[in-house]
Image (spheres, grey):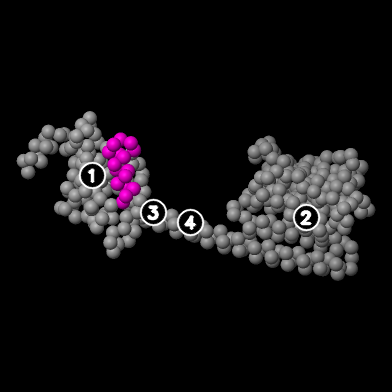
Amino acid sequence: MPGSAKLLADDPSLSLALAMVYSSATPLLLLDGEFAVMAASASFCGAFDIDPAHAVGKPLFSLGTGEWDVPQLRSLMDATRSGDAEIDAYETELRRQGGQLRCVILNVRKLAYDDPDNLRFLVAVADVTEARALAQTARELARDNDLLMQEVRHRVANSLQIIASVMMLNARRASSEESRGHLRDAHSRVMSVADLQQLLAVSTRDVVNVRSYLTKLCGTIAASMIVDPDALVLSVSAPDVSVEPDVSVSLGLIVTELVINSLKHGFPDGVGGTILVSYECDGDLWTLSVADSGIGMPIKRGTARAGLGTSIVQALARQLRASVVVSALSPGTKVSVVHTAAAPAEADNDVAKAQVAV
């Protein structure tokens, strides 16, 4: 082919482009200014079932059975030729007659070489059909997993509520006040986890809104343990922020223990007052507090014995890498669980040990 040889000799850039296409393991096409195929790599012909003997000289849009004749691709190629656009990672779908749908990504570069009369285009094609199918499968599995997890949480919440109801029923039937008290405490602890599972079951994200959770939790505690909600008010102050489920479990159990403690020892005679549960945060730093207007801490610190509730709070605070701080109010008591950058992993606050036994 003397004419082709002379053309290659007169145009070294074309020779280089052809060598690049024919040696490429990536599917490549070299097109002329009218988008006719000048060369097609073996990898392109093999990947898209194109006869290399009949590909050269044919327009891109007539390759195969016409699956490359995509209107948007035509428009983008025209815009690339005029210099108004570049095709960079353009994704489209191809369907050959009688064949399966294929997803491809095209990158097109104009090779002008300061010769507007001899435009050429290098087209790189990547078949991402399998990758997109795997991604779709992953999304479907994730959606199914989310639905399954929501159903599990819903069932767990129902089971915990049944257990809590049985505990409350037994508390009413118990002959001793001590037994009734222990059963009511256990009921509140179980319900703190049940409320959390309910919130997670209806959440679209695997996080817990602190304000919603603490408000629901305190409402549950108040309904089961406060005889006169008009005289003794339990309220919540918290921002609209979210935490991980495992953190929210600890926060909920801490609030449950501290509120039970306030109800038992801050208002022993059933007098009225307030209990405020508050949560404040600044980035990763946060403080969870329960403050009441009750009778306050015992005057003689050494007479108090750390009970189950105090031990639970201290253990949960250590898990959260937080410190427990007890402060005397006028009137009342405030217990804070403080997480700071310097909070010790094994926080064991001496003042917290003076908390009245639960």
Magenta stretch encompasses residue 280: no
Give the foreground label among 3 and 1.
1
Crowd band around label 1 with a 10 angstrom C-alpha radius: few (<14), some (14–19), many (20+)? many
Q: Tag 4, which secondary structure? A: helix
Residue under the image location 32 percent in, 61 percent down: 100
Residue 131 is tagged as 3
Mark 4 and mark 2 in contact (Cβ < 8 Å)?
no
Q: Tag 2, which secondary structure? A: helix
What's the distance in space between the residues labelled 3 and 4, CA to CA? 12 Å
* Residue 219 visible in rendering: yes
Span of residues in magenta: 70-85
Quadrant of the rendered image containing residue 216: bottom right
Q: Nearer the viewer, residue 31 or 343?
A: 31
* Amino acid found under the numbered disc labelled 2: Gly
Q: Nearer the viewer, residue 243 or 182?
A: 243
Instruction: Look at mark 4 in the image and give the residue it sits on.
Output: 139
Crowd band around label 4 with a 10 angstrom C-alpha radius: few (<14), some (14–19), many (20+)? few
What's the distance in space between the residues labelled 2 and 3, CA to CA? 49 Å
- Name which of mark 2 and mark 4 comes first in the sequence: 4
Give the prevailing secondary structure in the magenta stretch.
helix
* Residue 21 visible in rendering: no
Magenta stretch encompasses residue 73: yes
Q: Tag 3, which secondary structure? A: helix
